[in-house]
Every structure is written in structure tokens, then in C-alpha cells.
Image (tube, rainbow, N blue to C red):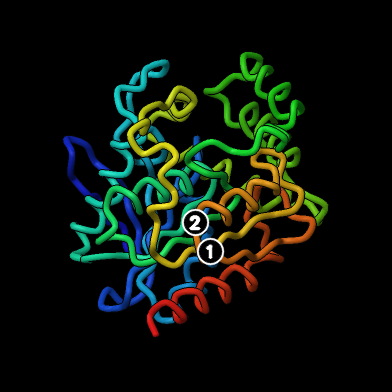
């Protein structure tokens, strides 16, 4: 594991890589409010052992990347796609296989439309379409919204207070598989202690932009794999149907009983699925 600070677009992005830099690159794009630690080091190592250079990174306002005053978001989702491309430039990669989870999946979709020559393939995990969805598909579970409404009661400078609150959120987003409390606690505490300014992560809540790329998923021509838990309370599983309809030729791996999470029980299916997906598109 090697850390590298990428300076581009007037900011700094903290990145870490796993594997041989001469190998084909996989760029891991995390979701809103979470750092690169969403992608466990062991998960990254398992991917790299398949013969890839795996790169994870902190988006703006999380981890060790550039942060902004809480309550301000002087950037948009297009800036985040530019950041992803800047990372490829720093690592001297003409293109990469983009693997995005939740918000990371949206960034990946826009990147594929905006920079088709830089995105070799897409893997979209626990996300929805960058465009209109089916109005009959349930929106985010109200229990999630109710939980977030309690955020003002948290002492965001106190590790114990933050951990106690966010572990409840992680459990709420988990599915029917056994909740991995200890692993989530380790991640939350690590994110809390390594962040330049922890509460800046909430700036992601007001992220805008990307209207020029809305409803253009039919333009995505690179091989696309969709990976989604059947118990996802953030992006309902039925969003996979919309993604498959709009991205022609896309394939689906459904994770039975999995919520909005990267559960260790699913790692073999995800790693092997990504490896086969990439191998198929490189033949």
C-alpha cells in the first residue's frame, strides 16, 4: 500500500495504491461522506492479486484531501469527475476500470459519458441511474431520513459520540447478513482520526451539478457490471432494472440479503465478478 498526494485542479487528493503500477488500473470511487477506507485494505489487496493496480482515494471534504468550511460546497459533481481523471493522469494511466459505490457510482457514470476514452469499463455498486428513474421505485427508506435528523444531537468533536451514532447508521443500512459491528467501528474511528476536518464530510449533502449529463446513459458503450444488494435501503434494488434498460449490454450480480454496504461475505463474489468482467471486456 503506497500513499500519494495528487495535486490538481487547485486542490490535494489523498490516494493509496495496491499492486504493481505496470498493471491495468482499477479506480475505486467511494460514496458520500465516507473516505477511501470504505474500501478495506484487504478488499483492495484481493483485487490487486488478480493482476491489477488498485487505486482508492479520498474525495474532497473527506479524509486527508482538501476540505472546505462546513456548510459550504464550492464544487459540484463535475469537479469530482475531473478529480478522478486527474488521479489517472498522476498515475500515468491512459484509462482505468472505474468501480463506484453509491455517489461513486454516479461519478463513474458521468465520467463514462464525459471522458469515454479514459474509462475502460464500469462497475456500479449500490447505486442508481444518473437520470430519471421509474416513479414506482421506492425512494430512500424513511428510517434513514429519520436517523439523519438526529445528527444535531451528536458531539462531532468527540470520538465516542460520533462512533456511537454512526454505528447505528451503519447497522440501519445493513441487510439481513450478520451486522459487522467491529469492522464498522474500526472504520468509523479511523476515519474520525485521520480526517483533516471531519464534519466537512456533510458538505456532500448539498452537492449539485451534472445537469448536462442527465439522462444520457444510453451513450455509455463500455462494458458495465451492476452489483447490488437486495436489501439496500438507500438505492432500492429495483434501480438495477432501470440501469440495465438504459445501459445496453450491462450485466447484474445481485447480492441476496445485502444492504447498502460492502459486506465481507460478498467480497469473493464482488472480486471474482469484477475480475471476470474486466477479463471479458479485454478479450
Position of residue 263 relative to residue 217, above or below, is below
Position of residue 257 relative to residue 209, above or below, is below
Residue shown at 25% from the left, 58% from the top: 88
Q: Is residue 5 left or right of residue 179?
A: left
Query: Which numbered tag is attached to residue 183?
Result: none
Residue shown at 66% from the left, 15% from the top: 153
Task: Indicate the position of residue 28 as horizontal and vertical percent values.
Answer: 43, 57
Position of the C terminus, as image quadrant, is bottom left
Quadrant for residue 2, please give it: bottom left
Count up the numbered dots: 2
Q: Nearer the viewer, residue 136 or 143?
A: 136
Q: CB under 8 Å between callouts 2 and 1?
A: yes
User: Circle 1 sits on which residue?
Assistant: 250
Position of the N terminus, as image quadrant, is bottom left
Q: Is residue 99 left or right of residue 154?
A: left
Distance, label 2 to label 1, CA atoms, is: 6 Å
Q: Residue furthest bottom?
A: 283
Quadrant for residue 253, please give it: bottom right
Mark 1 Cα within 10 Å, few/some/many (few <14, many 20+)?
A: some
Amino acid at each position: 500500500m503506497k500513499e500519494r498526494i495528487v495535486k490538481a485542479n487547485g486542490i490535494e487528493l489523498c490516494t493509496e495504491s495496491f499492486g504493481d503500477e505496470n498493471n491495468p488500473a482499477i479506480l475505486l470511487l467511494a460514496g458520500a461522506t465516507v473516505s477511501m477506507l470504505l474500501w478495506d485494505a484487504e478488499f483492495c489487496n484481493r483485487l490487486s492479486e488478480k493482476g491489477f493496480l488498485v487505486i482508492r482515494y479520498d474525495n474532497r471534504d473527506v479524509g486527508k484531501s482538501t476540505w472546505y468550511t462546513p456548510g459550504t460546497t464550492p464544487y459540484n459533481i463535475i469537479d469530482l469527475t475531473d478529480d478522478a481523471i486527474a488521479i489517472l493522469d498522476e498515475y500515468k494511466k491512459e484509462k482505468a476500470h472505474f468501480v463506484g459505490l453509491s455517489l461513486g457510482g454516479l461519478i463513474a457514470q458521468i465520467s463514462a459519458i464525459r471522458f469515454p476514452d479514459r474509462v475502460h469499463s464500469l462497475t456500479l455498486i449500490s447505486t442508481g441511474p444518473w437520470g430519471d428513474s421509474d416513479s414506482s421505485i421506492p425512494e430512500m427508506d424513511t428510517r434513514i431520513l429519520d436517523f439523519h435528523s438526529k445528527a444535531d444531537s451528536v458531539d462531532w468533536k468527540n470520538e465516542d459520540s460520533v462512533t456511537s451514532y454512526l454505528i447505528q447508521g451503519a447497522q440501519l443500512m445493513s441487510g439481513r447478513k450478520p451486522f459487522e459491528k467491529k469492522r464498522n467501528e474500526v472504520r468509523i474511528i479511523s476515519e474520525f482520526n485521520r480526517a483533516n476536518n471531519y464534519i466537512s464530510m456533510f458538505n456532500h449533502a448539498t452537492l449539485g451539478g451534472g445537469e448536462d449529463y442527465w439522462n444520457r446513459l444510453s451513450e455509455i458503450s463500455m462494458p458495465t457490471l451492476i452489483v447490488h444488494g437486495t436489501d439496500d435501503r438507500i438505492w432500492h434494488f429495483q434501480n438495477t432494472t432501470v440501469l440495465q434498460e438504459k445501459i445496453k449490454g450491462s450485466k447484474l450480480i445481485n447480492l441476496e440479503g445485502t444492504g447498502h454496504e460492502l459486506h465481507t461475505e460478498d467480497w469473493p463474489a464482488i472480486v471474482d465478478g469484477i475480475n471476470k468482467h474486466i477479463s471479458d471486456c479485454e478479450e
